[in-house]
Amino acid sequence: MNLTPFQLPFVFWIAMAGALGLIVGSFLNVVILRLPARMEYFWRRDAREMLELAPDSLPAPPDLVRQGSHCPHCKHPLGAFDNIPLLSWLVLRGRCRYCKAPISIQYPLVELLCGIASAIVVWKFGLAWQSAAALAFTWMLIAAAGIDFRTQLLPDSMTLPLVWLGLLLALVPLFVPLREAVIGAAAGYLALWAVYWIFKLATGKEGMGYGDFKLFAAAGAWLGYGALLPVIILAAFSGAIIGLVLLRMRGQERSVPIPFGPFLAAGMWIWLVAGDAILGAYLHATGLR
């Protein structure tokens, strides 16, 4: 008996989404590592041109797509069997096949996170356009969060496309109506912008970066203005807990900045896939339903 794609068991599509997520997660590791280096390179080049200085002799960092992966320690090009998502890291026991240097735990963690999150998205939205959009949303959030965690930068090349894509999808509408998306994007940006300036005027310090404003605007564009408060509560709660754990593990002072973007991204994703369940549980617990 021949089955059409839509007649296959739903668990099959969930598993395929997880496998696709592992593969995409491998590419996201490349983005997380290479994009900030390329941004810095082009910033430095543009600054030298503006100051009319001679170009420096530093080579451009590797391209995101065309240049293959290599060991950061011995620079040996990695073969196909060295790049199997998650499996290669496990088989090699977290060490380079060629120089035996340790491989960062970031690689399998990002791949595993992307795989699990992708499977959950398809389980939540099914075989629908919402799944395709939510997968793109998930992958961009993981990449942006990874970059912010490593460098405390949220690139405009990720946050601004998220805002615009959310607004365009609201024309359908796919998740929220256009009115809610537009108001949500504006309110999200202005809310953190106001918090930034209040904190700076009160303390003389910068509590967050402009990238956080744009990421929160994306939350409003995708999820609507009604999601902004629960998203920021989820982000603040998770940030406070994980931040304290990281400070204790690293032995850092409380004054050491911790990027807010990863927690904001986590709050956005959680509300996307579980917002209705969280809201229903809250209404039930408070007797409002």
Image (cartoon, rainbow, N blue to C red):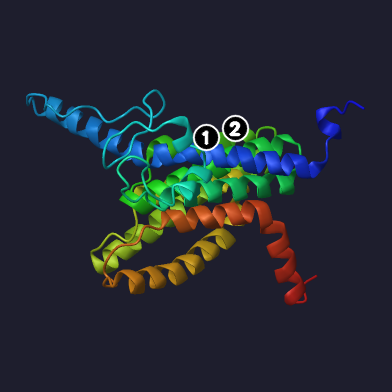
Amino acid found under the numbered disc labelled 1? Trp
Q: Does residue 185 appear left or right of residue 127 in this picture?
A: left
Amino acid found under the numbered disc labelled 2? Leu
Distance from label 2 to label 1 (Cα)? 6 Å
* Residue 114, image x, y percentages: 55, 46
Per the image, the residue denoted by label 1 is 164
Which residue occupies the extreme left position in the image?
53
| Residue nearest the viewer, comparing 89 with 65 | 89
Q: Does residue 51 appear left or right of residue 201 in this picture?
A: left
| Residue nearest the viewer, comparing 12 with 216 | 12
Q: Does residue 164 appear left or right of residue 248 in this picture?
A: right
Position of the N terminus by quadrant: top right
Say which quarter of the image contains residue 99: top left
**For the residue labelled by badge 1, is the local secondary structure a helix, a strand or a loop?**
helix
Please rate how many residues cluster around mark 2, counting C-alpha atoms within 10 Å: few if below 14, some from 14 to 19, many from 20.
some
Q: Residue at x 70, y 43 (%)?
A: 15
Q: Which mark is residue 168?
A: 2
Q: Is residue 71 above or below residue 93?
A: above
Say which quarter of the image contains residue 51: top left
